[in-house]
Image (cartoon, rainbow, N blue to C red):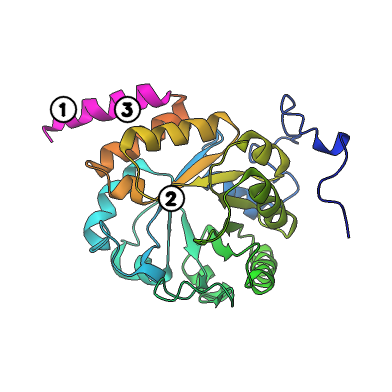
Amino acid sequence: MPDNGGNSSSKDFHLDVPAAGEGFFVKGASGCDWGMKNRLADMFNSKSGNTVMLAFDHGYIMGPTSGLERLDITVPPLIPYVDVLMSTRGAFRTCISAAVKKPICLRVNYDSSVLFDDMSNGGGIACDIRNAVRMNASCLAVQTFIGSPGEKNSLELLARTVDAGTDWGIPTLGVVAVGKQMERTEQFFLLATRMLAENGAQVVKSYYCEGFERVTSACPVPIVIAGGKKLPEEEALAMAWRAISEGAKGVDMGRNIFQARHPAAMARAVGKVVHEGFTAKEAHEYYVDILNTSGE
């Protein structure tokens, strides 16, 4: 069994050396086919190299989350201010206009509901590649349960999704799941993000942690951070700023946008951090200015 602690040289993450590239701006995608590169270029801004994803797939395990009781009312006003929409096929087909010109990241796996909080199975495929192609998906999202009893099954689902997506030039987003009893440490995220990338995911979604710059350095594909639970707007912007400063290539936020006091303003402020280099303080001042102008 390999020593995952490694020797001194294996711990040198070369934080001062940018990832090798061969003429394409999305990390790790230089060797991909044209179609996959084209979809990744739709998702990631060519100037900043980053992306703002709006996650509203919570209902597939949580039901009507606060702020998402009515997808058809909450989500459309936010679409102009984000780069990618992430949700389920049912949400897109029933609540989002097909005239929307934004790439979609399609949740293709199912899990047990939060009532069971059970990771023993690891879920299964809820939307196959034929449905994803009919949905014109730009990316396929698969949840993985590293360090839980469902790990083996969820990694198999990831690998199968990567294979199917590669056949059609559609990238896969590997999502690092964290349960209530699972650690959220640098060591865990170093392991989980690297496993997902080496099992073929072209993009990885993970959580921010201390030592995050080593996590992003060691992962050969772009990492976007999950927003997680609702934070005060200033704290959410600070988390986004730290993550981008430490190598993240974007954010995939849900509750920290649609549960904000002014969701559209929050989406715009997040975009300022991700694409324009605003500090957390500058982005929060921008957010407050919009609140004051709108009178809310």
Dot 1 corresponds to which residue? Answer: 292
Question: Residue 172 in the image: x percent, y percent?
Answer: 61, 59
How many numbered markers are drawn? 3
**Outermost residue to the left:** 295
Q: Nearer the viewer, residue 37 or 295?
A: 295
In this rendering, the answer to whether 97 lies above or below 189 is below
- Left or right? Give the position of 261 relative to 163: left
Give the extent of the magenta segment. 279-296
Q: Residue at x 37, y 72 (%)?
A: 90
**Disc 2 on helix, strand or loop?**
loop
Distance between mark 3 and mark 1 Cα atoms: 12 Å
Expressed as whole percent of the image width and height from the top left, the position of residue 286 reads: 29, 25
What is the residue that sits farthest to the front in this orientation? 181
* SS at badge 3: helix
Neighbor class of circle 2 (other Cα within 10 Å; few <14, some 14-19, many 20+) is some
Q: Does the magenta stretch include residue 291?
A: yes
Q: Can the viewer see residue 47?
A: no
- 285 within the magenta span: yes
Element under disc 1: helix
- Residue under the image location 35 percent in, 62 percent down: 98
Q: Which numbered disc covers residue 228?
A: 2
- Position of 273 with respect to 43 (left or right) is left
Mark 2 residue type = Gly
- The residue that label 3 is drawn on is 284
Residue type at the position of mark 3: His
